Amino acid sequence: MDGSLVFVGPQEKWHSFVLRMVENELDKQARDALRAVQRMAVVLGARQVPEPDVLVVTAEAFERDEPSTYYVPEDVVLVVEAVSPESVDRDRDTKPRKYAAAGIRHFWRLENEGGETAAYVYELGSATGVYALTGIYRGVLKVTVPFDIEIDLATVGRRARY
């Protein structure tokens, strides 16, 4: 992770639940030219290889044989990080700065706020090269970029019924 050894504590149930739900919803709602994946490396530069919690990448990148262990920033449409107690500084500060510097246009940060999931949605400013907060969502996350997405955040941890 980010070129350094990181010791991670036990994962919270919320973290696991929210990642599974968001990955599934993004993959289901994405246009055919996009796919969602969990915890794949993104090579941002020398010794800069974070593994975002969830990524939306181009279908072309998803389907290619090589490289099979990582993506490059040009492949990535959206990065999602779910904040855990051990990752607060990395997910709120370090990783967003690195993703923005690499030109990844869309970034979401998910947080467990007293049992309620909040989604902080950012878009890269073309003039500034930094992320601008475009909205904070609780209950339902509904956006039109990078594609039409609607996710019921209140269902985190509930079993999906198909």
Image (tube, helix red, strand yellow):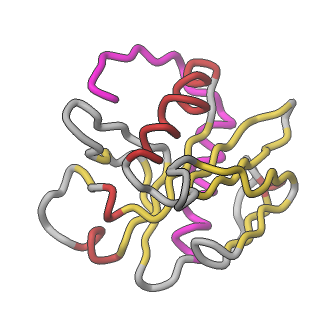
For the point 54% across and 77% down, the residue is: 30
Q: What is the tally of numbered marks visible in this picture? A: 0
Residue 144: x percent and y percent?
A: 69, 76
Quadrant for the C terminus, please: bottom right
Single out the residue that lies furthest toward the left: 66
On screen, residue 59 above or below 87: below
Q: Nearer the viewer, residue 48 or 33?
A: 48
Residue 117: x percent and y percent?
A: 79, 44
Q: Nearer the viewer, residue 53 or 121?
A: 121
Q: Is residue 17 magenta?
A: yes
For the point 50% across and 60% down, the residue is: 105
For the point 52% across and 26% down, the residue is: 90
On screen, residue 125 above or below 162: above
In the image, the segment drawn in magenta is: 1-29
Q: Is residue 142 magenta?
A: no
Quadrant for the N terminus, please: top left
On screen, residue 152 above or below 45: below
Residue 125: x percent and y percent?
A: 58, 57
For the point 12% across and 62% down, the residue is: 66
The quarter of the picture where residue 101 lies is top left
The quarter of the picture where residue 123 lies is bottom right
Residue 14: x percent and y percent?
A: 69, 37
